[in-house]
Image (spheres, rainbow, N blue to C red):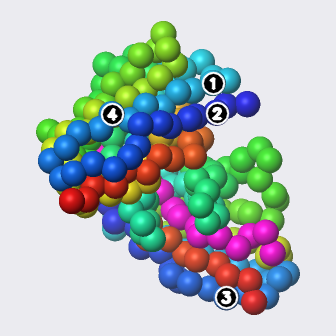
Amino acid sequence: EVQLLESGGGWVHPGGSLRLSCTASGVDFHSYAMNWVRQAPGKGLAWVSSISGSGGVTYYADSVKGRFTISRDNSKNTMYMQMNSLRVEDTAVYFCAKSPTVIGAIEIWGQGTMVIVSS
Amino acid sequence: EIVLTQSPDFQSVTPKEKVIITCRASQSIGRSLHWYQQKPDQSPKLLIKFASQSISGVPSRFSGSGSGTDFSLTINGLEAEDAAAYFCHQSSNLPLTFGGGTKVEIK
């Protein structure tokens, strides 16, 4: 069974930084693209970023471009999101999610990690 | 950016009724449209991929149809456990986008 487990969420001041991690089990991690999708409290889903299986291709939503960096370490079955210059509007539950290709159907989701940006 | 417009926003339904949720794309996306169920405090769960492909383990009362710009998710014979929010999602173009969601409540 495929499982995705996020960690690294928490509370941070505006302008601060956080690094999220997503560790996968039960899957050939390097064979799949990975994504970050966020959901602000009481709101819908919003795509944040995607990375190819090799890590060589990355994409970002305009709202986070230049502030967030997605990466992965296939030897550790782990994906990361370095989030810098955080804003109040980045407050959300961040889900990691697996898809067969970098632009493809999101198939499996983690349970999410909460990020709160507030003064 | 491809905008996905779902309707209705909210639906209150009696058990065993049929539910139809629609999702309209702002431009043609072929069949790159997927449906998810999200229960409170849970992560989304894939119900249907590529407009009409069923997913292993998902009850057969869930089905999808459509192509191009107009899609629908049908729940044939709603059960109490189907109370949830339902989202559509397109993977045709970046940025990946989601519909605003439809909340289904059991009467």
Question: Residue A3: which numbered mark, if any?
Answer: 2
Q: Please state the horizontal and vertical placement of residue A18, each as a whole percent of the image.
A: 29, 38
Residue named by callout 4 = A19
- Do marks 1 and 4 share a subunit? yes
**Distance between mark 3 and mark 1 Cα atoms:** 38 Å
**Distance between mark 2 and mark 3 Cα atoms:** 33 Å
Residue for point 77% across, 44% down: B56
Q: Are marks 2 and 4 in contact (CB under 8 Å)?
A: no
Between circles 2 and 3, the one closer to the viewer is 2
Q: Please state the horizontal and vertical placement of residue B1, each as a whole percent of the image.
A: 26, 58
**Distance between mark 2 and mark 4 Cα atoms:** 20 Å
**Distance between mark 1 and mark 2 Cα atoms:** 5 Å
**Distance between mark 3 and mark 4 Cα atoms:** 40 Å
Bin the neighbour count of mark 2 within 10 Å (Cα to Cα): few under 14, some 14-19, many 20 and up: some
- Do marks 2 and 4 share a subunit? yes
Provide the residue span drawn in magenta. B80-97
For this view, does A66 lie left or right of residue B59?
A: left
Note whether residue B76 is visible: no
Inspect the image, locate mark 3, and give the three-letter code of the amino acid beneath it: Ser
